[in-house]
Amino acid sequence: LSSPQASGIHLGFSCGWWRHQESTWSYTPANFLRALRSQPVKVTSIETQRSIPVWVALALIYRPIKAPWNYSFLNQMLAKRSMRSQAAAAGCDAVITTADETFYAGVPTFAYQDMNFEVARQYSDVIDRRLLATQPTSDSHLRKIAERQSEQYLGLSGVLSMSHWFRD
């Protein structure tokens, strides 16, 4: 077997982990990170989740407007700043992001996704909103975050699709 640094590539892997890290997004990021670490590349975990005090503060700020705090502009700005600073400090050549983190990390950045907010917005009129893979929010807020994410995609080097239906 070759050493992890054999290829000379240094990847950052960004995820806003849940409190039980392993089960985040149905174990997909944890399994993907394990698979990356089995390859001949150096992999640095870039963790962008909020600390519990910040999580509580954001939840309280956004509670009156009934918008999920984790989709807020403020939380996204904090996560983006954290991702960029950690990628730079680690000297990553590229970053792979998962879930809702679709911002440019300062180096070539690829989002690994099975869903996005525009798809959720389009399906919100077709199926029961509770079946969507987003937290409950209003139509106008879902439209705003879909537009923000579409703008973020422009800064990415690519979007890696987990599934055929999302790719198509």
Image (cartoon, rainbow, N blue to C red):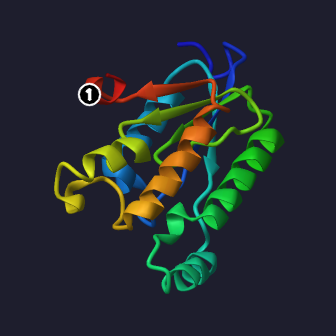
For the C terminus, the quadrant is top left
Question: Residue 33's spot in the image, x, y percent?
Answer: 48, 37
Q: Quadrant of residue 4?
A: top right
Q: Could you classify mark 1 by the number of other residues whose Cα lies within 10 Å: few (under 14), some (14-19), or many (20 or more)?
A: few
* Residue 82: percent from left, percent from top: 72, 54
Task: Look at mark 1 in the image and give the residue it sits on.
Answer: 165
Q: From the viewer's perspective, is residue 123 above or below residue 130?
A: above
Residue 101: x %, y % from top left: 55, 47
- 31 sits left or right of 14 in the view: left
Which residue appears farthest toward the left when viewing the image?
127
Given residues 154 and 18, the one toward you in this image is 154
Asked which secondary structure carries label 1, the reply is: helix
Q: Tell me the kind of residue under disc 1.
A: Trp
Asked whether residue 101 appears in the rendered view, the answer is no
Nearer to the camera, 43 or 154: 154
Residue 156 in the image, given as x and y percentages of width and height: 63, 30
**Left/right of residue 82 with respect to residue 144 in the rendered view:** right
Number of numbered callouts drawn: 1
Q: Is residue 9 visible?
A: yes
Residue shown at 58% from the left, 49% from the top: 148
User: In the figure, residue 108 lies in which quadrant?
Assistant: top right
Comparing 112 with 22, the one in front is 112
Position of residue 80 relative to residue 51, above or below, is above
Residue drawn 60% across the image and 67% down it: 50
Q: Nearer the viewer, residue 24 or 60?
A: 60
- Residue ID at (42%, 47%): 117
